[in-house]
Image (cartoon, rainbow, N blue to C red):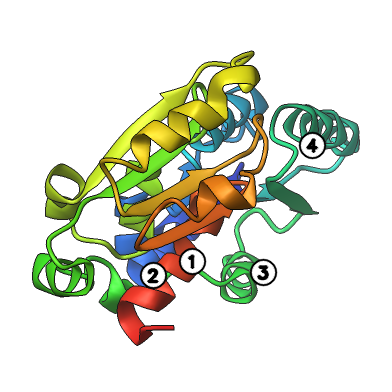
Amino acid sequence: MGTIFVVGFYDPVQSDLERNYNQHLELGEIIWVPQVRRGGGADLVRLASLLFQKLAEGCDNARVILGRRSGEEWMEASMEALAKQVRERYANTAFSYCLTKRLGDSKPVLDEIEMFGLSTIATIGAIGMNQLTERLNGNKVLCVRRRSRPNFQDALRRAGFCEESWENVFVQETIEPGRHSSMMEDFEAWSNSYRFLLYAWDGLRTLKPEVKSRFAGKAYEAPTPSKVIEPFKRWILEGV
């Protein structure tokens, strides 16, 4: 799932966000970044800190809505520099931004959020233990990623899996960078204990077909946890 950062706007915009998207704010799908001080302009340092924290947690689609004052044309270059850092560190993450001078007007902000597309609150936590247990026949699901890459727990929560499932259904393993030579052996060993696999291969490599087929239930792989969860969730809900 994605995250929108709303940066540098006046208090009335925050009030409208809380009125229209309060639960998304609480879940961290919308992040309000206040001005440096009242009337002091956008806090780009705080934005960068929150952005990279969110990316490290597994966000795979981030958009910044930035309010800039007249005379702050330099912010365009600053945002380009930030976008370059994101691309270098998180190559599989979608990142975009837009700028506006309407710092007290919530309409362009609300329009951007609507176009971006956030999770439907009614579906958050909708996949419960009974549904998972029935579909998995009581088996656990192995989640594998490279160490220092986004984790599965946050991605599963954003996809609507109940909190209880993380402790009872999903097991996360991490692979150290530089262990490519023995990585397939690790998966072969894991296949003896797990029938289901979710593998985020960003920073590693994709699985050999013969290794993937050793998982007797289902084995899914994609660059990031969020991407690999999509087909798994579809199978849980629809059986396809």
Considering only order in the chain, which callout, 4 or 3, is on the residue closer to the N terminus?
Answer: 4
Relative to residue 185, is residue 209 drawn left or right?
right
Q: From what the image shows, is residue 3 above or below residue 180?
A: below
Q: Amino acid at mark 1?
A: Glu
The residue pinned by badge 2 equals: 233
Tag in front: 4 or 2: 2
Q: Amino acid at mark 4?
A: Ala
Residue for point 77% across, 54% down:
98
User: Residue 100, how many percent across, how many down?
Assistant: 77, 55
The residue pinned by badge 3 equals: 108
User: Residue 144, how many percent across, how many down?
Assistant: 44, 37
Q: From what the image shows, is residue 102 above or below residue 190?
A: below
Contact? badges 3 and 2 (CB < 8 Å):
no
Q: CA distance from mark 4 to mark 1?
A: 26 Å
How busy is the neighbourhood of tag 1: few (under 14 within 10 Å), some, or many (20 plus)? some
Q: CA distance from mark 1 to mark 2?
A: 5 Å
The residue pinned by badge 1 equals: 230
Q: Amino acid at mark 2?
A: Lys
Q: Quadrant of residue 233?
A: bottom left
Residue 15 visible in the picture: yes
Q: Helix, strand, or loop for circle 4?
A: helix
The residue pinned by badge 4 equals: 83
Residue for point 64% across, 37% down:
202
Q: CA distance from mark 4 to mark 2?
A: 30 Å
Contact? badges 1 and 2 (CB < 8 Å):
yes
Q: CA distance from mark 3 to mark 2?
A: 33 Å
Q: Which mark is residue 106?
A: none
Tag in front: 3 or 1: 1
Considering only order in the chain, which callout, 2 or 3, is on the residue closer to the N terminus?
Answer: 3
Q: From what the image shows, is residue 192 above or below residue 234?
A: above
